[in-house]
Amino acid sequence: MKSYPTDKIRNVALVGHGGAGKTSLAEALLARAGAVQRAGKVDDGSSLLDTEPESHKRRISLSLALAPFEWKADDGNTYKVNLIDTPGYVDFEAEVDAALSVADLAVFVVSAVDGVEVQTELLWRKAAAINMPRMVFVNKEDKERADFHKVLDQLKSTFGAGFVALELPLGEAATLHGVADVLSEEAYEYEPDGRHHSEPIPADVADEEHILHDAVLEEIVAGDDEQLERYLSGDVPSVAELERTLAHEVLDRSEFPVLLGSAATGVGIDRLADFICELGPSPADRPATVAAGASTSTVAADASAQPLLQVFKTIADPYVGQLSVFKVLSGTVRADDKLINSTTGSEERMHAMFVVRGKEQTAVSEVVAGDIAAVAKLSNTHTGDSLTPKGLPVKAQPIPRPSPQYAVAIVPHTQADDDKLGNALGRLQTEDPSLVVDRVEETNQTILRGVGDAHVAVAIERLARKFGVNVDTTEVRVAYRETINGNADAEGKVKKQSGGHGQYAVVNLRVAPLGRGEGFQFVDAIVGGAIPRNYLGAVQAGIEETMAKGGVHGFTVVDVKVECYDGKYHAVDSSDMAFKTASSLGFKDALAAAGVVVLEPVNLLTVTVPAAYQGDVMGDITARRGRVQGTAGVEHGEQEINALVPAGELLRYAIELRSMTGGRGRFEMQHHHYDALPAHLVDKAKASLPKH
């Protein structure tokens, strides 16, 4: 593939709800452009873009995939289109975020059968929030129950004004045979090879097409004062003039063209490619925002400027090692250039650069501003990092990442798996930064967190397939704690004589509760040398070790004040070990005498849901022993609910909220405080302790 100037490059993300046919559409575009001999299929595993076994198993896309192709458009120019296919399942939203971070146009793929679905709604809001130009392709027009007009009405009722239908279907479902071009008022009849020829508009759609033509024409010229004045004076702009005006309105996000067709039959595919090239913005139209310290500025996609690139995806390739996929934000990057990672300060050499299409890699010697490519074996660069010339420490905007709200504990199968686990998890996180790994010492578990259950399941399968590390999963243990609810005194004594030096120590302790979150306080109240100063450190260490190992119920002890006020020692038989043991025994007795209460972590939960689900969600929170703190109306007619809920009641909330709200609910949570666990739940909490 040859190099193209920046203004002839189009970076396009295909986004939308799962099952709308994004990958099939990408495959159809590649085939129609001649980039591949035939379109692959998701269902039979022949897709060029969905290549991983985990994707074949589920028959869904799990990560973004690049599908660049060259296209000679109707305007006579040839373009390079960097198509980015994205997953439609919410668990893999981070891949969509990465694609949108480098795209200049989002094509929303909507099923003509199913219409506007929940993930399309959420992604439309996301794209609007980052000022992303958008157009819509209504796919599956060849399927039974396809209804273009219903989908168009849905788009307008869900998202508001600005949708410009540039086509009408000729036939629909099994009778689909072409499209009517609303601007040129021509019919395009399609051949089996996906090519079309023009004919007059059929009589059965002529009236509707003429009405729509006038409405669309007025919609377009209303955004351009000069064209509007000409139009009102009777001078109707040409199709080319209308498209140029519409291109500006797409860039300004005031108009959203709506196209239609079928990835399966090829109807409308070439027209989609034409409109992507002719109406879609180039990287030159959308300067990148960069930061230098606390200040931000924009950088134009100028091939003659200093090079600046951002890595937006990392791939663990079994043959070439780590592949870093990047977009050149400015300048021209050439093979063997040396650039500086503005995050780590390390120097990176651009050894081997590739254009990537699925798993295919084609070597390139340079990459110009606005274009996308990959480079192998960057030693210290990760997803989101920026590479710049020496002395230019700017950073591109960070790529947003969804919060990982679903967690499992992972346990290696064997010691060999355990030995490799840390390194494998690190490499897995390099590929997918939306995964989070925690080692929780309090519960002695390694926790893997992801966006949802499918995200975590796929990560575990990849851990085994790519890195040879097999793990089992188990439920995350809640970090229960215990404290005392009264005062008590106790004596700890060690007295042992077995020939030679014995062990002797007596420690008198007084315990009292501290406020929540105050931890541990040790008070030295020894007078008269009852215990020598050099042994008091061992006394304190014995208490702290016992607190960490667990109190009466086996949970970590917190919020306790311990006063050591008396004791005895022996000049020969006393030792640090003796006093450590004595203080441990005394502390355990003091806990039992003072009485203990088990504490549970309580999270601050913030749930955002459509108003229709507010009652159900609040009722569910109450059933989880939660306390609603307040509600407020937010954007898009949604309600935000704030509540304090025990952490143990939220272990599967990511799945359960999604089920309760049809995927429309989302939430954030963070630790807030510890509170007393009801007595009738203590035995259940103790059952979660690891068996020794």
Image (spheres, rainbow, N blue to C red):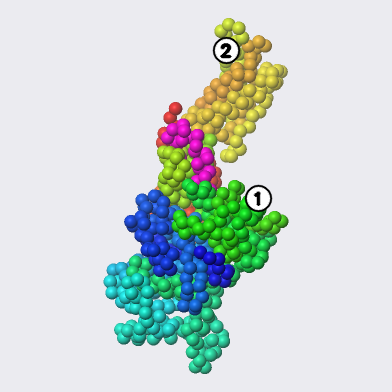
Residue 265 vs 403, above or below: the answer is: below
Nearer to the camera, 83 or 586: 83
- SS at circle 2: strand
At label 2, which amino acid type do we have?
A: Lys
What's the magenta region? 407-432
- Residue 446 on image: x %, y %: 49, 39
Q: Which residue lies furthest to the top in this view?
A: 499
Q: Was residue 414 drawn as part of the magenta stretch in this picture?
A: yes
Residue at which label 1 appears: 347
Q: Was residue 273 drawn as part of the magenta stretch in this picture?
A: no
Q: How many labels does the image show?
A: 2
- Residue 360 on image: x %, y %: 46, 56
Residue 683 in view: no
Residue 495's mark?
2
Residue at position x 64%, y 56% in the image: 337
Horizontal side of residue 328 vs 266, given as left or right: right
- Residue 520 on image: x %, y %: 61, 33
| Residue at mark 2 to residue at mark 1: CA–CA distance | 64 Å
Residue at position x 42%, y 67% in the image: 34
- SS at circle 1: strand
Mark 2 or mark 1: name the one nearer the start of the chain: 1
Quarter-wise, where is residue 174 in the image? bottom left
